[in-house]
Amino acid sequence: MKKYLSMLLVVILLAASISACAPESETAEVAEEVVEETAAEEAAQDVVEETFKDKGYKLAYIQNGAGDTDIFKMSFDAAKAEAAKLGMTVDIFTSGEQGDIRFQDLVNQAIEADYDGLFISHGKEEYSYDMVKRALDAGKKVVTFDTVIKDADGNGLPEATAMFQDDFEMTRLSLDYVVNELYPDTRPVRMLKLWYGPGIPPFDRRQVTYQEFEDEGLIETLEVLAPVDLDNIEGSMNTVMASVLPKYPEGSVDALWGTYDAFTRGAYKALSEAGRKDIKVVSIDLSNVDINLMNEEDSVWEACVAVHFENVGIQGVRLLARKLHGDETPPNFDLRPSLVPADQLTPDATVMNLSTIVDGYGVFDDNWEPWMEELQ
């Protein structure tokens, strides 16, 4: 309505200027025509947006694995809140400990149900192409997260938007910090690497950039460490790290790099228990527990790189809304990460308020369209 009144004011002023050089009857006719056209355009736009919000679109957010960690709860809650802004609802489903079989069953149930859009998270490459194709063939709009969609020939499904954290940039930011901030005069920096794979898409992408740093002679990997019990990642990583540390006397390792924060927590605790302050820790991903450990007195956990996980849910919902609205959407979308140095953390820092502490963390302006603004 405000936009309409502004346009009407412009029309009135335009009519006044026309009247100075045109017959009175002609001026009135021109002004009346412009007002009628403007009102018609505004009414049509209002109908379009009101129709979208009144559709009552339903989305299913389906997570492979447990959803009880801080970051996934953040994503679920943010998805629900964002959907509500746009007149949509989101139902959350997680496969829990039942894993891939239960996950695929949940997706198939959602395909058969009356959901308009599916947000599919952490599907495995061996079945995700066929699974997503079934959803698309059923007329569903689809956005995926951390899910590789490729058939046997390497072809994807561009109708579905595949969303990832920008794992290449996350690795670059974290390793840049190690080599240029922590050890600018050391080449190569001697590293213990926490990694598991191949076969886990985000870890595989992070490995690509890690290899580039190795190839450039910036870092040297002394050993690759991985958990042996995936049902107890943190405890397993603690045991593995504790068993390896005696091989490396003080001064023989510069840094420990963790490709995943659960790996890093276990290794960090092993370092603390052994009293090893000579090895600096830098990691990828972030939770409130990580922040508390980084804030410990004399902590060697120097930095992490992370995407604000609220943004996972927000962008998934916005991309689905754009698809339902008929907007053109990209086949791929990467979430922007931020470096979080420990020396910038305040005692009360959490994953929820970190956006007020670290520049760039929690910037959510992607995929927000003018028509969405009109709905508010």
Image (cartoon, helix red, strand yellow):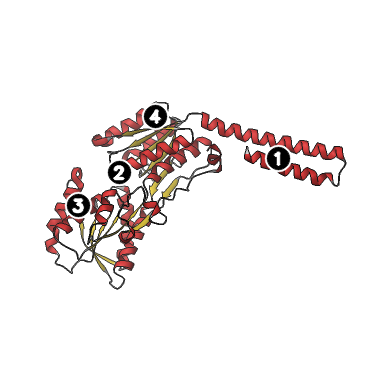
The amino acid at mark 2 is Asp
Q: Earlier in the sequence, mark 1 or mark 2?
A: 1
Which residue is under mark 4? 111
The amino acid at mark 4 is Ile
Q: Earlier in the sequence, mark 1 or mark 4?
A: 1
Q: Nearer the viewer, mark 1 or mark 4?
A: 1
- Secondary structure under tag 2 reads helix
Q: Earlier in the sequence, mark 3 or mark 4?
A: 4
Look at the image and tell me in which quarter the N terminus lies. Answer: top right
Q: Pick out the residue farthest to the right.
A: 23
- Secondary structure under tag 3 reads helix
User: Residue 8 has which mark?
Assistant: 1
Task: State the residue in front, 39 or 200.
Answer: 39
The image quadrant of residue 15 is: top right
Which residue is under mark 3? 266
- Secondary structure under tag 1 reads helix
The amino acid at mark 3 is Gly
